[in-house]
Image (spheres, helix red, strand yellow):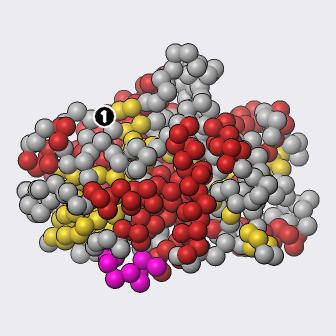
Amino acid sequence: MRIESDFLVIGSGIAGLSYALQAADHGSVAIVTKYDVSESATNYAQGGIASVISSEDSFEAHINDTMIAGAGLCHEDVVRMVVEEGPKTIENLIEWGVKFTTKGASYDLTREGGHSARRILHAQDITGREIQRALVEAARNHKNITIYEHHIAIDLITTAKLFNCSKDKNCCLGAYVLDIKGSQVVTFSSKVTLLASGGAGKVYLYTCNPDVASGDGVAMAYRAGATIANMEFMQFHPTTLFHPLGKSFLISEAVRGEGAILRRRDGTAFMEKYHKLKDLAPRDIVARAIDNEMKISGDDCVYLDITHEPADVVRNRFPNIYQTCLELGLDMTKEWLPVVPAAHYVCGGVAVNMNGETDLKALYAIGEVTYTGLHGANRLASNSLLEAAVYANRAYLHTIEAIKKPCSKWVDLPEWNSGTATNSDEMVVVSNNWDEIRRFMWNYVGIVRSDKRLARAMRRVELIQSEIEEYYWNFIITSDLIELRNLVTVAQLIVSCAQMRKESRGLHYTIDYPERDDVNCKHDSYIKKEL
């Protein structure tokens, strides 16, 4: 089966949907999403989207906060562009039907860690769900957009792979996609392919990411020959609920923004000794502080205390968090919430320029799947939704010109060939490898690293990779096998980039090089597959 479109969008979060809604005015758009269209990291974002809206704020202040959080690795031109184009993208979201929480005649702006001013627009504590709702509704109502749910991309289709063209003329022609429910591989051909497939939190044992976050876009782009950068910078959200039934439920940083305090089991507030901003320090510092306190005390968690705030204020400001915790037997207005860090956001990814272009012709990427230079070594809270929306607009403006000169081979694609592959009766191989990857990544490539731990992780990656590749080519593919193949590729990229960085900076902390090194370090850790 074959489907043609002007634009192919892989992913259905704020990045993919924002782009699709604009591109659809200039051609046909196919959106491929591996579960329900609303199942994305965007849907789970609680805190909000950062932008300079208040007259008491300024672009320079937001730029400065972002640069400080990024620990010297942000690209200033990118930071300035994203911050200054922020208000316009907020207007786009509002026009598409997003309803942010107001306070009187103004938007109710909140503050999160690392921000020097209140600049976070939110929809109570379910901002992502509200953005997803509005964008999905708008996309479903657009005549030029077709959404393919329960479709998972297998690999990008490129001229280098199919037609043996030179690397410098390598062009993306679309993607082979598995229709999960129909159990068939569909050939999607397009003039422009956009990766908006999100992050890779599932590569770690503990994550607050949804199940879709298996690093598919990064892995596919790498295999296709695109450059990947800075995968060592995995952000661990400091405050994920520690509860056997909570399934890594995230406690928004906005709770600390409204006055919550991190405490040890004995009640001692500890953040003051780690940073002058105390509980509102950047996420990398808070996550390492919690990790250190847990190791010192031997406790399984620390506690988040907002019981000193009026109960009505807490319930009204955080209705979703309050209700979810209450269903688990925890009343946050009366008792402390047990919390631990968990993998949350990868600051590296597919390297792109300021228009979302990769170094593979006709392949664009936006959102968490990318490395733009905005976040540097550590993402400032609520800058991710902003980045996705800004780059969606810039990529749209660039690609409506790109489709006028598509690769001549985009309509001449062969169907997927499964060869002699058979159905597997050994799915235990998939599940065992899945568990092993996530566990050694947590133990060896987590919040604190070392050369020895990274070397151990790489040995395991290489062993599992060879096993998965043999399995992949011998058996008919499934969505679980596709995700596993991508997951081990992402693990390899994270470890490889971490081994390149001989210093501690931002989200990358190693006991062998505990200090930041501004003299000898590489600004960015680039990695590219030889085709």
Front residue (pair 301, 200): 200
Front residue (pair 470, 19): 19
| Residue 14 locus on image (x, y percent) | 49, 64
Please state if 138 lies on the left or on the right of 61 as rendered.
Answer: left
The residue positioned 46% from the left and 36% from the top of the image is 230
Magenta stretch holds residue 26 = no
The residue positioned 37% from the left and 39% from the top of the image is 228
The residue positioned 83% from the left and 46% from the top of the image is 263
Please state if 308 lies on the left or on the right of 381 as rendered.
Answer: right
Q: Residues within 10 Å of mark 1 (few under 14, many from 20)?
A: some
Span highlighted in magenta in the image: 138-146
Q: Amino acid at mark 1?
A: Lys
| Residue 322 locus on image (x, y percent) | 75, 69
Please state if 228 lies on the left or on the right of 387 as rendered.
Answer: left
Per the image, the residue denoted by label 1 is 528
| Residue 319 locus on image (x, y percent) | 74, 73
